[in-house]
Image (cartoon, rainbow, N blue to C red):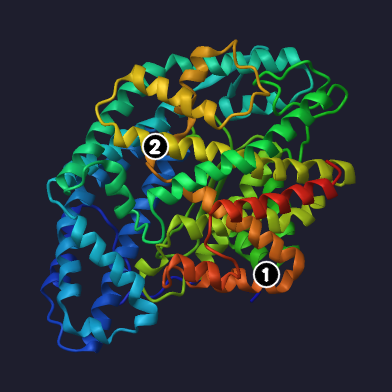
Amino acid sequence: MNNANITAKKRQFLPEDFTITNWGAIQPYFEELQNRELVSKESLNKWLADLSELESVIGEDACWRQIRMTCDTTSPELEQAFEYFVMEIEPKIKPYAFEINKKLLDCPFNKNLDAAQFFTYLRSVENSVALFREANIPLQSEISLLAQQYGVISGKMSVTVNDKEYTLQQAAKMLHDSDRLLRKNVFEKVAERRLEDKDMLNEMFDKLLALRHQIALNAGFENYRDYKFRELGRFDYTPEDCFEFHAAVREYILPLQKMLLEYRRKTLGLAELKPYDVDAEPIGRQPLQPFHTGEELLQKSITVFNQLRPFFGACLTKMKEMGRMDLESRKGKAPGGYNCPLPESGVPFIFMNAAGTTNDLITMMHEGGHAVHSFLSHDLPLSAMKEYPMEIAELASMSMELFTLEHWNVFFENADECKRAQLEELERVIDVLPWIATIDKFQHWLYTHPGHTIAERETEWLAILKEFSTDNVNWNDFPEYRKNFWQKQLHLFEVPFYYIEYGIAQLGAIAMWRQYKQNKEQALDNYMTALCLGYTKTLKELYATAGIKFDFSPAYIKELSSFVHDEMNSMGL
């Protein structure tokens, strides 16, 4: 498979020139689906196809509104277009979606659908019907508007260093510099800038917590944690499994992280590490610069993907041809990075804030993995089958990071620099797991302690942070910033409980990489076969198709951490 030529399916239900202007334009199509008689398996299949088409058209429109707004948070028109969808269209869709889902479940012909392909879809529909409460619709709209303000606030953040203004993403690049005074200055400026908005973010977060708790109560749950586990369709694991993950990270991953930090301290020749030292290069060694512009990043990424498999490179090339990327950091752009699937056209959009660092290279490999997943699952018959859970979505992206490692010489002609970059990626694999455990455990506490005060939240945050931190880094000069450090994690504001997925998928990606080291072509075949399935199989079945286990038990974490340790040793760490 070398061809990534996706064509949008010809519309059969909506006019080809139909665009979403207001609710009145869409409503007749929902009413037709709601009222149509289903008299046979064939009529059910046609009804499902028409429903899928409508969902795809609406989904793509919603995605473009979000993409445009995050690319330019300074535009009132783009913000209003997003808000109009959230407040005037989405809330009116939900009652119809509920009735349509009930119609599907009540239809006797659903028993004639292919169980192998439709089991997870019907399970998700049943789950949606069970959770639906009309009283939650306005609350969910309010949450959507409130959460997107995090990006607006963050997009305005900048610092001035040596009389030049930088976004926080651009400034972070200087934390790799060998000049310790520069690093300290930049770190302090970033900390001070973030703290300027801490009260505003705390106030926003309190509102989000209260709204989310009310949604849980309305749906008959004791707390939002239990509600969200159900809403996210976490059928394959429980909160107790998450606690096991936390404990295993503490036992097996923290010692590796401590070893890496001690190695960095010795390399830098410092008596102790401060938070502005953890990414630094030693004196006389320049930070790695894998690329200078967004265009260079894209071209080199296409080359890397082509070397891995021509199909992967073809996906990025198709996205470039269609203008489906916004890669460089600039003021007024929302923070972070994402791949946004566009369900009707099938060609996704990559958004990121590149500033020329190795982390940006890793982000591009990561989002490129998501993009490949979008391409591979596009031909599934129903839009809902492409709405795969994050545990498999992040496996696609994190595995791609590790698969591409051996081709990073495209970015680094110097062999020593290439090895440095590869080690940075393995360090990141280790570093991210304690942070995932920190954020996940914090969320369990946040939502099982409704009504807590800001002071109580800060106290609990510091306790959890200490639990998953080594003692190598001295934060004593930044107590206030440390106390509010959680505010930099956008997931807490925008997508609650979406974080443990990174940990589960990171373990899966390590297992995929181990499989790749043993048999490259077989591993890539398994990877592509699993991603083609979208969400037509359970998580455990998808992981098994990829040739690995869906497992994050202490024994498995110990086994995989030993593999990474051995790989780092073989690279000279």
* Residue at image coords 63%, 24%: 171
Q: Quadrant of the N terminus?
A: bottom right
Q: Secondary structure at mark 1?
A: helix
Compare residues 48 and 220 and report the one nearer the observer. 220
Q: Is residue 15 above or below residue 283?
A: below
Residue type, numbered disc 2: Gln
Spatial distance from mark 2 to mark 1, Cα to Cα? 34 Å
**Quadrant in which residue 310 is drawn:** bottom right
Residue 142 seen in this snapshot: yes
Q: Position of residue 513 (x, y in %)?
A: 69, 60
Residue type, numbered disc 1: Ala
Q: Which residue is mark 2?
A: 443
Q: Position of residue 211 (x, y in %)?
A: 23, 35
* Residue at image coords 17%, 61%: 98
Q: Position of residue 155 (x, y in %)?
A: 47, 29
Residue 323 seen in this snapshot: no
Seen in the image, is 401 located left or right of residue 439?
Answer: right
Compare residues 511 and 209 and report the one nearer the observer. 511
Compare residues 96 and 29 and report the one nearer the observer. 96
Other residues around mark 2 within 10 Å, as few (<14) / some (14–19) / many (≥20):
some
Badge nearest the viewer, 2 or 1 = 2
Q: Secondary structure at mark 2?
A: helix
Other residues around mark 1 within 10 Å, as few (<14) / some (14–19) / many (≥20):
many
Q: Quadrant of the C terminus?
A: top right
Q: Position of residue 137 (x, y in %)?
A: 18, 47
Image disc number at residue 523: 1
